[in-house]
Amino acid sequence: MVRKLTEEDWNKLQKGMSRYYIQSVEDGTVKVQFDSEIVVVEPGDEDLLGRVRPEDRPPIAEAKAIIDGVEKIYVFGNPSFSFTRGFIEECKKHGLKPSDVPGSVFEITRTGDWEQEFKYIGRADGKKADTIVDDKTKQTVIDTIEEIKKNSSEILDGGIGKNAFTKMIYIRGKVSTSDTESLLPELEKEGIITVKGDKVFVI
């Protein structure tokens, strides 16, 4: 016989859920609102949930966060790995200091075992982030477009969807999809591409 879940059932189910969140490729893009600074838990130290890190385990970076409305501990992994370094790079690009992490909102996409994208959205209070793309990144996008024109021009025939275009630049040139998208108006102004609706045409 079926029965309805009670509030007590809900609470029990929530308690059974892991408070730690380790993002995987299958999760796609996840919006993460950080609720603390990033801490590094050394072997023998207590983590943010009060659990002692085993002595035979490497140090781990983590932070309190809200994911899909649920409080979690966002696990970055070993602080020396590319995941943590990539997050710090995105923070510095927007002038964020360690103390600015609480209240900040990011879209994080894990694209592979050792590949990920970070996009700073803004503050939890609604202040949006300015998109900042340096000249080196812009030149990388231009060089990647030229490389594709030279070696894989058939991909560009008849135009290509914006999402497919930005993903292609990410795969070939390792420029984040958000950076490439923000450069589209500038690239169009310089006569490198034309954007019509949801399609990009390389000139």
Image: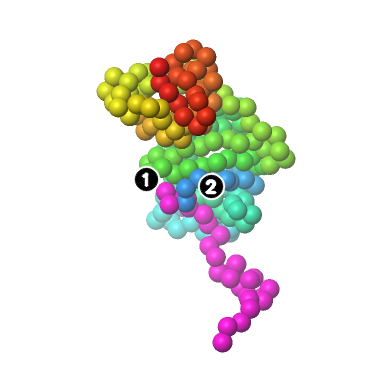
Instruction: Please tell me which residue is depicted at 53% across the width and 17% down the height of the picture.
Output: 186
Determine the residue located farthest toward the top in the rendered image: 190
Instruction: Please tell me which residue is depicted at 58% across the width and 40% down the height of the picture.
Output: 106
- Give the number of marks: 2
Tell whether 173 sits left or right of 123. Answer: left
Q: Amino acid at mark 1?
A: Asp
What is the quadrant of the N terminus in the image?
A: bottom right
Q: Position of residue 128 (x, y in %)?
A: 66, 33
Decide: is 91 above or below 150: below
The label on residue 113 is 1
In-front residue for pair 142/72: 142
Nearest to viewer (mark 1 / mark 2): 2
Q: Position of residue 121 (x, y in %)?
A: 61, 36
In-front residue for pair 140/199: 199
Instruction: Please tell me which residue is depicted at 42% across the width and 48% down the height of the picture.
Output: 25
Instruction: Please tell me which residue is depicted at 56% across the width and 28% down the height of the picture.
Output: 92
Residue 72 location, quadrant: bottom right
Residue 116 location, quadrant: top left
What is the quadrant of the C terminus in the image?
A: top left
Q: Which residue is mark 2?
A: 30
Which of the marked residues, 1 or 2, is nearer the chain's N terminus? 2
Q: Amino acid at mark 2?
A: Val
The magenta segment is 1-26
